[in-house]
Amino acid sequence: MLMGTGSDVGKSLIVAGLCRLFTDRGMAVRPFKPQNMSNNAAVTVDGGEIGRAQALQARAARIDPTVHMNPILLKPETTTGAQVIVQGKRSATATARAFFRSRDQYMPAILDSFRRLAGEGDLVIVEGAGSPAEVNLRKGDLANMGFAEAADIPVILIGDIHRGGVIASLVGTQTILSNDDAKRIKGFLINNFHGDPELFSEGVSFTEQRTGWPCLGIVPHFAEARLLPAEDAVALEKAAAIGGGQFHIVVPRLRRIANFDDLDPLKLEPGVTLEIVQPGRPLPRNADLVIVPGSKSTMGDLAALRAQGWDIDMAAHCRQGGAVIGLCGGYQMLGRMIHDPQGLEGQPGSSPGLGLLDVETTLLPDKTLTRVEARHAASGLAVAGYEIHLGSTQGPDCARPFTHIGDQPDGARSADGRVMGTYIHGLFSSDEFRRHFLASLGAEAGTFAFEKVVDDTLDKLADHLARHLDIERLLGLAAPVKL
């Protein structure tokens, strides 16, 4: 199990790289994260949802993702509450306090999923969440030492030197853990190193002497990580303009933005500049395309969008002939009304939408979770992606669908074709469609194959780890699972 001295120290990335490395050595590898918190979800082959990081790790292991790779997924809906997904299905919506009060009830499902994976593979690589140093959360813990103890597995601790204070974070973690938890840690590694590792040799020796843990390697900064899907919306909080192309795509950063990996293929397009607009700033007037992304809280994010004045900016953008596409929750926002008769996102009621599409949405309790293959209505080009949403959308503009899924229409387009909406996530990963879509709006589209870029980057990541980690020693620390 790989844990970190804090959040965002590279756990997900290193697990993905190790999954590819050991898979290519002929092992059947399974990634696992007992508890994740993210609105960036993936739809699995068995019809559930998990954190997108585990889907990427499954891809690194050259297998399809299943619900058992992330049995507990928390999807924040408000500042104090989240949707609880258990083995791929929505179980409840709970406040943070209510979840922590009763979280021990979820350990059986976690252990069930873990043992299923262990029974079908040679090696399970487990990712922790946050840090085990949060000792105030230790009682009833599902994500770090609580799980490691329940499953009786060894731990490797990761520190990010680029953040500063890596020696203190490693030594300090040992200092505040209980003796039993500290003994479970069998080694540490340093991630995100810049410069000459020899200059840190005394730091390694000091840390080894103070902790008694061996250093399993110093991993230099892996710049190509930017080509892989990001897991956490934290990555968007400081994002601004990406790329230097003439075609300007603007994305308002919603508070509960979901499935923002939709943007990843567009970030790589050489003819595109993709700008994430942070709250407090207007949408730029020189935008060619505005993308309203998915949301975990459509009604709440719609209200926040209005509070920012972005609805006014979008109306002006449309009057000037600009294009808009809404994805999933963003599609729902583009319509005339959103109805929530059962109070799925708060108090029951209705809210006016942005009025850019002549459609209305009713939120429904049954969540659509499915992988799809579709055809773009305007071009006939194939699109592959997935649906993950509550609600049904109807209205006159649905007579001009964005895609067809089999013989069923999906999405809508305005009469002039400049405003579009679809429930399909991941459609920009389909290369031929992406090139056509951008070209139809006047953008210069590249020729790269997005899925190949991701796979090639995973290969490079595996090679990077193989060069800088003591792989044999790391593998030797793995322990048999007690099924």
Image (cartoon, rainbow, N blue to C red):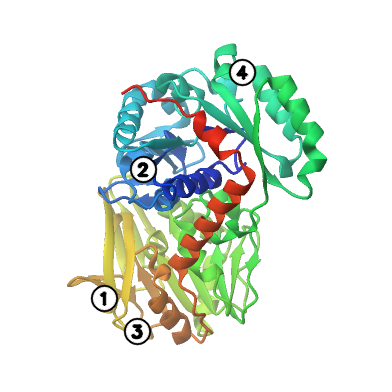
Q: Where does label 4 land, which residue?
A: 177
Dot 1 amino acid type: Pro
SS at badge 1: helix
Q: Where does label 3 land, which residue?
A: 415
CA neighbours of label 2 inside 10 A, class few (<14), some (14 to 19), many (20+)? some
User: For the residues carrying marks 2 and 4, which lies nearer the camera in this image?
Assistant: 2
Residue at point 49%, 80% (across, down)? 447
Q: Write down the quadrant of residue 75 in the picture.
A: top left
Dot 3 amino acid type: Ala
Using the numbered discs, state the Cα–Cα distance from disc 1 to disc 2 in whole angstroms: 50 Å
Q: Position of residue 18 (x, y in %)?
A: 50, 44
Q: Where does label 2 land, which residue?
A: 28
1 or 2: tag closer to the N-terminus: 2
Residue at point 60%, 38% (across, down)? 470
Residue at point 51%, 57% (across, down)? 459
CA neighbours of label 1 inside 10 A, class few (<14), some (14 to 19), many (20+)? some
Front in this rendered view, residue 343 or 62: 62
SS at badge 3: loop
2 or 4: tag closer to the N-terminus: 2
Instruction: State the count of labels.
Output: 4
Dot 2 amino acid type: Ala
Query: Cβ–Cβ below 8 Å for labels 2 and 4?
Result: no
Is any atom of residue 39 visible in this view? no
Using the numbered discs, state the Cα–Cα distance from disc 4 to disc 3 in whole angstroms: 62 Å
Q: Where does label 1 land, which residue?
A: 396
3 or 2: tag closer to the N-terminus: 2
SS at badge 4: loop
From this view, report whether residue 210 is shown above or below residue 179: below
